[in-house]
Amino acid sequence: MAIRDGRLAADDSVDGRPHLPPGAAMQLPGRGTTFVRTMHGPQHAPTVLLLHGWTASADLNWYTCYRPLSRHYRVVAIDHRGHGRGIRSKKAFSLEDCSDDAMAVCDVLGIDRVIPVGYSMGGPIAQLIWQRHRKRVRGMVLCATAPYFITSREERMGFLGLSGLAALARLTPAQTRQWLTEQVFLQRKTQEWEPWAIQEASLHDWRMVLEAGRAIGRFNSRDWISEVDVPTSTLITMHDRVVPLRRQVRLFESIPAAEAFRVDGDHDAVVAAADTFVPTLLRATHSVVERSRNTP
């Protein structure tokens, strides 16, 4: 994949839209319909399960990584609940549901063991996959993420505000949720994103996305993260203005025998600094695979 200045080169896109792996709607028994992309990779290769961040989708988060990862691994990527073409439900959003959705995808695909690769919100989902489905986790790669996301009063008030917006979105008609889409998110991205990315983000169910923000604010794995017993790599975004560096370091220090990989970038490094992020992700994943060969 040719990446220049954090963007796909012209020969890797069509009409401004990046080449994307095959994808389709998938019915998850008893859960709903989500959207999944897959790439088979080399024969007998380990499976990496890509878990995207908040307000993103699998494609928005991982499009720079699909093809490089698929040269070495089987790749599976899911849209989480309310994001992109993920499951729609009247049930309140929970990170636990997202972790179970991801493993239900693996059930449909006949995949037994995986390496969850979580970015930002995908980090808590990956941690919960380990906690809830331990025998199926070969290792983890945790990117730009943390074991908790709020400590200060200001942060707590911000997440309470999301709770209020989420409640409003439950009570207001579809056109009001569309207004939220335009005002809260897309308007700020119009000058930065390609049209395909804006169209992708417009698919979100903003009631569920806002509830996801509330769930992130409530997440805290500090009581059990030190019990992680699978090879783990953490990708630390050194200039992250969303997930502070100290919290990413806390995650690394809390997991026994974790290995840290540093990326000189902000929270959007997977796209804006793809030329350094993608090779670092490959090294981090390879490290997990190699260490897992020595793990029962």
Image (cartoon, helix red, strand yellow):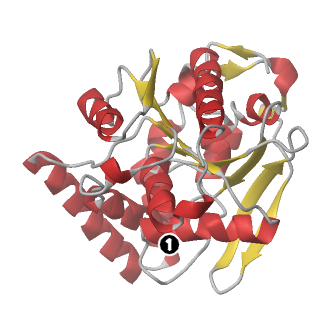
**Near-viewer residue (277 or 42):** 42
Residue 11, given in percent of the width and then of the height, sits at: 87, 20
**Near-viewer residue (182 or 139):** 139
Instruction: Name the kind of residue labelled 1 in the image.
Output: Asp
Residue plotted at (49% across, 84% down): 90
Residue 206, given in percent of the width and then of the height, sits at: 47, 64
Residue plotted at (61% across, 37% down): 294
Residue plotted at (32% across, 39% down): 251
SS at mark 1 in the image: helix
Residue 266 visible in the displayed image: yes
Q: Is residue 213 above or below residue 142?
A: below
* Quadrant placement of the N terminus: top right
**Near-viewer residue (256 or 37):** 256
Which class describes the residues within 10 Å of circle 1: few (<14), some (14-19), or many (20+)? some
Residue 41 in which image quadrant:
top right
Residue 80 in which image quadrant:
bottom right
Position of 290 with respect to 232 (left or right) is: right
Residue 8, given in percent of the width and then of the height, sits at: 73, 23
Residue 238, given in percent of the width and then of the height, sits at: 37, 20
**Near-viewer residue (269 or 219):** 219
- Reading the image, the residue beneath label 1 is 97
Can you name the residue that lies furthest to the bottom here? 30
Residue 207 visible in the displayed image: no
Residue 192 in which image quadrant:
top right
Position of 177 with respect to 159 (left or right) is: right
